[in-house]
Image (tube, rainbow, N blue to C red):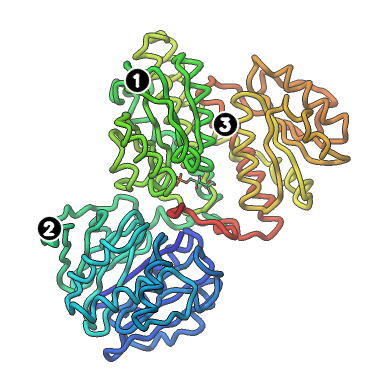
């Protein structure tokens, strides 16, 4: 969601850095893009609707510049168009912005009374005018930005250039991500690390309400009291090779194929040598009597799988909630409740707000996060990192699987701390890891996915059904298909279909049916037969132990049976790859689906 890049330095041409950076931030989702660069002490702004290549066509790359800011916009205030795109310039101030200003209408009225007029519908232009007004009064950018942070309500990461300072870049943030990257005689700002990885892997995390002043040779960070502070320089560990496609057609396909490695890397720190048994290196879960899992999208679906596993093995109630609901609802929590927040990016605005709400109630919080040092990781009491590496495709695959794997480990740890499971049983789970990895690799190579995709890619409507853990998988399968192929689908608990939605099933409506849980398999199969009797074209995903020759399905993918903890990691692979093949047949923009952003940093 909105990407920011900024450069100050004499070593490179700012224009090249900005365009490269914007391309690296494309995965965040956007509908227009723009840059502002300093040329002969004058700011030039170029903006365009649509893809970055439209913007590139308007740029003269021979121009030399040593200072600039760039932006990919995901529309919030005002439609996607050139006027609403960033950068915005008012008076001497040019800015790019990620976030939402809640009191912009109020501020706009005051600014209009002070003689300002506005071209766009954006909240960003209002910030720009506000900074210009304050600068005309105070003439000192640090004091201006200090005042500004007291006046703005909402979330923002800002890159700012002042006409009077052609060699200086300013930045400030609150609740929207921004890093300061460090080069030699050059410095950068960016929403995320991939945008600067071509140049440096050294960076500083700008914290809420801090102001950064960057020149080519110096970075000053000011705290809330306007004192210069020393910040820790971090080194980014994922390398650029790992963020490239490595020969795959799409990042999504590459990331699906990375899952065996990612699962191994995620589990490894918590088990002893040679995949033998569980290590005691997780937070202590002994005192919790209830767990709330809170997340959005696929992370929420991973949470639903966590609920089944924790309730089954640790025998305590787990409530799974969508973060945008949880943050506003009455909570039933006490000092024996643990709130687990799951987030790949660690920056999802609703998940972050839910975390803060739990903390306000003095409840223990645990974050399951991929991006190291992200806001959720930093603010939670404890954090467990999944080791998915950089996930570029908007549709999550490897991070989702790693979240599921981590929740399985948490289930075992809680069960162990509550003496609900024997050591032998835990060891049996752990010792299945090699089998899991091998079976994942085999499933990735199954050749039936394309055949199934060819049968369904021109349908308008389909269903995913399952019961218990298979229903949670159905939800993720349905979301994957929807987000990248734009085909409408619904996930249903198999037993619920006949309470209304079965009326939508007609001749050849595709129904994906997932059957991996022996305890409920026959019930699900009865529901599949009900759908089949109404014309459904059933695509059955079934474990080998439950497989049978029968006439209630049209296509079948048989997956190996493994223990409950690891089963979802196998079952999800066909669903991911069929969605991918469908989206490819429909010529969709698989890695950057329309209207979506990788990291949803606004409410
Ligand atoms: O970064 P997060 O895990 O907090 O993101 C949560 C959702 O926005 C995310 O899982 C989204 O649903 C994905 N696009 C699904 O593929």
| Nearest to N terminus: mark 3 or mark 2 | 2
Disc 1, disc 2: CB below 8 Å? Answer: no
- Provide residue 398's location: percent of width, then percent of height: 49, 42
Q: Which residue is mark 1?
A: 336
104 horizontally vs 498: left or right: left
SS for tag 2? strand
How far apart are the alpha carbons under marks 1 and 2? 38 Å
Q: Is residue 109 above or below residue 508?
A: below
- Provide residue 559's location: percent of width, then percent of height: 64, 28
SS for tag 1? loop
- Provide residue 585's location: percent of width, then percent of height: 71, 55
Which residue is pictured at 39% across the width and 17% down the height? 289
Q: Is residue 402 above or below residue 179?
A: above
Disc 3, disc 1: CB below 8 Å? Answer: no
How far apart are the alpha carbons under marks 3 and 1? 34 Å
Number of other residues with Cα within 10 Å of mark 1, as a class: few under 14, some 14 to 19, many 20 or more = some
Front of the two marks 1 and 2: 1
Q: Is residue 247 above or below residue 69?
A: above
- Using the image as rendered, state which of residue 376 and residue 507 is in the foreground: 376
Q: Which residue is mark 3?
A: 570
**Which residue ends up furthest to the front in the rendered image?**
113
Residue 99 appears in the figure = no
How far apart are the alpha carbons under marks 3 and 2? 49 Å
Number of other residues with Cα within 10 Å of mark 2, as a class: few under 14, some 14 to 19, many 20 or more = few
Number of other residues with Cα within 10 Å of mark 3, as a class: few under 14, some 14 to 19, many 20 or more = many
Q: Which residue is mark 2?
A: 229
SS for tag 3? helix
């Amino acid at each position: 969601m909105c990407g920011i890049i900024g450069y100050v330095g004499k070593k490179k041409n700012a224009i090249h850095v900005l365009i490269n950076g914007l391309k690296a931030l494309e995965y965040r989702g956007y509908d227009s893009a723009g840059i502002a660069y300093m040329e002969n002490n004058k700011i030039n702004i170029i903006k365009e609707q649509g893809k970055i290549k439209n913007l590139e066509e308007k740029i003269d790359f021979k121009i030399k510049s040593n200072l600039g800011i760039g932006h990919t916009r995901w529309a919030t205030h005002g439609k996607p168009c050139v006027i609403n795109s960033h950068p915005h310039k008012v008076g001497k101030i040019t800015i790019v912005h990620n976030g939402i200003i809640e009191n912009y209408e109020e501020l706009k009225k005051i600014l209009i009374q002070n003689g300002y007029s506005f071209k766009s519908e954006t909240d960003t232009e209002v910030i720009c005018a506000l900074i210009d007004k304050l600068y005309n009064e105070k003439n000192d950018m640090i004091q201006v930005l200090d005042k500004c942070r007291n006046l703005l309500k909402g979330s923002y990461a800002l890159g700012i250039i002042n006409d009077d300072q052609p060699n200086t870049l300013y930045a400030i943030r609150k609740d929207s991500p921004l890093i300061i990257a460090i080069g030699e005689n050059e410095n950068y700002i960016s929403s995320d690390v991939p945008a600067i990885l071509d140049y440096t892997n050294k960076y500083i995390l700008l914290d809420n309400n801090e102001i950064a002043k960057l020149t080519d040779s110096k970075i000053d960070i000011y705290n809330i009291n306007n004192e210069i502070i020393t910040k820790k320089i971090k080194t980014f560990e994922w390398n650029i090779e790992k963020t490239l496609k490595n020969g795959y057609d799409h990042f999504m396909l590459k990331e699906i194929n990375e899952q065996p490695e990612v699962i191994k890397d995620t589990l490894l720190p918590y088990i002893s040598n040679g995949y033998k048994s569980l290590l005691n290196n997780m937070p202590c879960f002994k005192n919790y009597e209830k767990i709330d899992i809170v997340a959005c999208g696929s992370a929420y679906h991973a949470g639903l799988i966590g609920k089944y596993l924790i309730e089954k093995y640790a025998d305590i109630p787990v409530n799974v909630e969508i973060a945008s609901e949880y943050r506003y609802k009455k909570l039933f929590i006490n000092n024996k409740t643990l709130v687990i927040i799951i987030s790949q990016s660690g920056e999802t605005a609703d998940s972050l707000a839910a975390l803060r709400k739990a903390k306000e109630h003095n409840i223990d919080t645990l974050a399951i996060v991929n991006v190291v040092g992200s806001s959720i990781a930093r603010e939670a009491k404890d954090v467990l990192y999944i080791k998915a590496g950089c996930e570029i495709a908007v549709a999550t695959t490897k991070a989702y699987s790693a979240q599921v794997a981590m929740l399985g480990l948490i289930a075992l740890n809680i069960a162990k701390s509550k003496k609900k499971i024997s050591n032998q049983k835990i060891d049996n789970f752990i010792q299945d890891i090699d089998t899991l990895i091998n079976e994942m690799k085999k499933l990735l190579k199954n050749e039936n996915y394309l055949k199934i995709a060819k049968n369904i890619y021109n349908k308008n409507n389909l269903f995913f059904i399952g019961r218990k853990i298979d229903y949670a998988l159905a939800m993720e399968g349905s979301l994957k298909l929807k987000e990248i192929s734009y085909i409408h689908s619904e996930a249903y608990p198999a037993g619920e279909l006949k309470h209304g939605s079965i009326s939508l099933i007609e001749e050849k409506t595709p129904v994906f049916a997932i059957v991996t849980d022996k305890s409920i398999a026959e019930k699900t199969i009865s529901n599949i037969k009900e759908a089949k009797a109404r014309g459904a074209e059933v695509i059955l995903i079934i474990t080998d132990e439950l497989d049978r020759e029968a006439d209630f399905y049209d296509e079948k993918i048989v997956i190996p049976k493994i223990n409950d903890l690891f089963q979802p990691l196998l079952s999800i692979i066909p669903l991911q790859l069929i969605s991918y093949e469908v989206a490819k047949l429909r010529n969709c923009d698989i890695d950057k689906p329309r209207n979506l952003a990788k990291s949803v940093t606004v409410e």
